[in-house]
Amino acid sequence: MLRVGILTSGGDCQGLNAAIRAVGKALYLEFGKDVEIYGLRDGYKGLITGDVWKMTPNDFSGIINLGGTILGTSREPYKLLISGTPEAKEKIEGMKSTYKKLKLDCLVILGGNGTHKTANLLSELGMHVITLPKTIDNDLWGTDVTFGFQSAVAVAANVLDSIHTTATSHGRVFIVEIMGHKVGWLTLYAGIAGSANAILLPEIPYDTKVLARMIDKRSKNGKRFSIIAIAEGAMSKDEAKLNKREFRSKREQQAYPSVAYQLADELGQLTGHEVRVAVPGHIQRGGSPCPYDRVLATRFGAAAAKLIADKNWGNMVGMRDGVIVPVPLKEVAGKLKTVPLDNDVIQTARDIGITFGDK
Ligand code: F6P
């Protein structure tokens, strides 16, 4: 009997259920009655506390288009897990003990960056681990794309579309803040798809004066509105010169709710235009996965089942140049995939006159 545990950890995203479904369907097809799948509730928490249930083929049906995760999720910070405190040690012992008690042959873990660090730790502790890359941020190293990303791009682009009509009516400047944590993939793609006039990424610090000039120029050319897509992790050129501590203390002193409000204030003062902020927030992680993500998650899930059949442990399923490949967990863990400055999508945006606020 093959015994597989499955969990989703970290921030949810669209496509998790599609991936879970594919893992289940492919495993039942390959192993029939010789496989048992155990769902661990709310991410690593379920593994720590032994909160688990035996799943049946029915659990994997009718969920390809369902947002969120049927397994539940939570954040269990890696930093705390390796802190060496008695609480952290207890959690690690809890995970080992659940794995042993359930007599698991392997764990399938669906997650983003933080999740992968812990998955690698479990692998180093001797557990058999296979992971799937999920996140709207698309920032996982080792895979060209993660599921959730394209669905979130669609949501954020839709927000930018909607903002256009009200911005035009009122002749306002709008700043739309887009998720993505420390990287700009989501803002870059949504910004182009939603025809933003400026796209501000963490990878390219901006100069507020460049943005003010863009707004004034558009105004002089008879454009009643301007739209700026800003990544939540974006920063100005001056801020980019600060070290981590100085940066944090500057932001704390200014006490804006987020970077979009800071920029709105500065641009309002510089240009005299009416500036408004829109923050779609977690809506970008909600709702049904788009068809692309359903297919991608299905491909990743089915590939995970193959790795299990081959006992090819310690890998993330990734995609490189359109091909699904296993990527060793130890290579993935702790690395961030930022937008390279020579990325051709950035160049495409520049080619059609979108500014990144840098020059
Ligand atoms: O990693 C996905 C993400 O949505 C990021 O884009 C965002 O910074 C973060 O999670 C928000 O986290 P939480 O759901 O814990 O508020």
Image: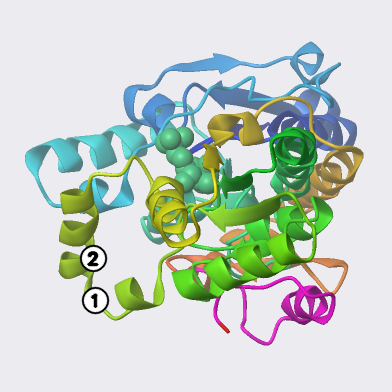
Q: Residue at x 61, y 48 (%)?
A: 173
Residue type at mark 2: give it: Phe
Name the main secondary structure of what is drawn in magenta. Answer: loop
Which residue is nearer to you in this view: 324 or 250?
Answer: 250
Give the vertical position of 137 relative to 318 (above or below). Answer: above
Q: Is mark 2 within 8 Å of ligand 1?
A: no
Where residue 43 appears, x then y in whole percent? Answer: 47, 31
Q: Which residues are magenta?
A: 335-358
Q: Secondary structure at mark 1?
A: loop
- Residue shown at the point (21%, 75%) measured from the top left: 243
Relative placement, left or right, of 348 versus 209 is: right
Q: Nearer the viewer, residue 13 or 269?
A: 269
* Residue indicated by mark 2: 247
Query: Image quadrant for the C terminus?
Result: bottom right
Image mark for residue 242: 1
Label at residue 354: none
Q: Secondary structure at mark 2?
A: helix
Residue 219, position as x, y percentages in the image? 70, 60
Residue 66 image-quadrant placement: top right
List x then y, in percent, for residue 291. 91, 39
Q: Is the residue under label 2 in contact with that under label 1 (CB below 8 Å)?
A: yes
Q: How is the image coloured?
A: rainbow
Q: For residue 174, which quarter of the picture? A: top right
Q: In the rendered image, which quarter contains the N terminus?
A: top right
Residue 105 place in picture, x, y as percent:
57, 41
Q: Is residue 145 visible?
A: no
- Vertical placement of 157 versus 146: above or below? above
